Image: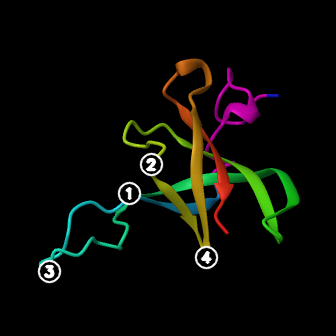
Amino acid sequence: MTCKNCKNCDRKDNLTGRLKRRVTFHRPPTGADSYGEPIDQWPVVASVWAAIEPLRGREYFAAQREHADVTTRIIIRYRPDIDRTMNVVYGSTTFEIGHIIHPDFAKRELHLMCKERQ
């Protein structure tokens, strides 16, 4: 199926319609404040449009407590400044980036495999 504006594209490859959520990337703090204390504030790197797709969830018991893991794929347009040390924030939910996938190494989009922070 082709979209109305393009003759040679497949609709599922069109990022514009899929990126509906606004997410913010935060970098880990570095350095210290004027008193020599480590900085706790994670600085904002960028705010971008993204698609968020929950892939898998599980619950388990460890150390006499119940835990839950949710694996989520976040799709964004390609950015060279994104790395695995960053967190992604959507609303009140924070995601830790586990893996960054470059489909076809085309520099069109990034697939971020994330875990929801508890």
**Residue 90 placement (x, y as % from top left):** 59, 67
For image coordinates 60% across by 59% down, the residue present is 95
Which comes before the other along the chain, label 2 or label 4? 2
* Residue 15, above or below 40: above
Which comes before the other along the chain, label 3 or label 1? 1
Q: Which residue is mark 2?
A: 85
Q: Is residue 87 left or right of residue 50?
A: left
For the residues marked 2 and 4, what is the alpha-carbon distance in whole angstroms?
A: 19 Å
Q: Which residue is mark 3?
A: 35
Quadrant in the rendering for residue 40:
bottom left
Q: Is residue 48 left or right of residue 69?
A: left
| Magenta range | 2-19
**Which circle marks residue 71 in the picture?**
none
Main SS, magenta residues = loop
Q: Are marks 2 and 4 in contact (CB under 8 Å)?
A: no
Q: Is residue 17 left or right of residue 2?
A: left
Q: Are marks 4 and 1 in contact (CB under 8 Å)?
A: no
**Which circle marks residue 92 in the picture?**
4
Which comes before the other along the chain, label 2 or label 1? 1
Colour convention: rainbow
For the residues marked 3 and 2, what is the alpha-carbon distance in whole angstroms?
A: 26 Å
For image coordinates 77% across by 57% down, the residue present is 70
* Residue 57, above or below 35: above
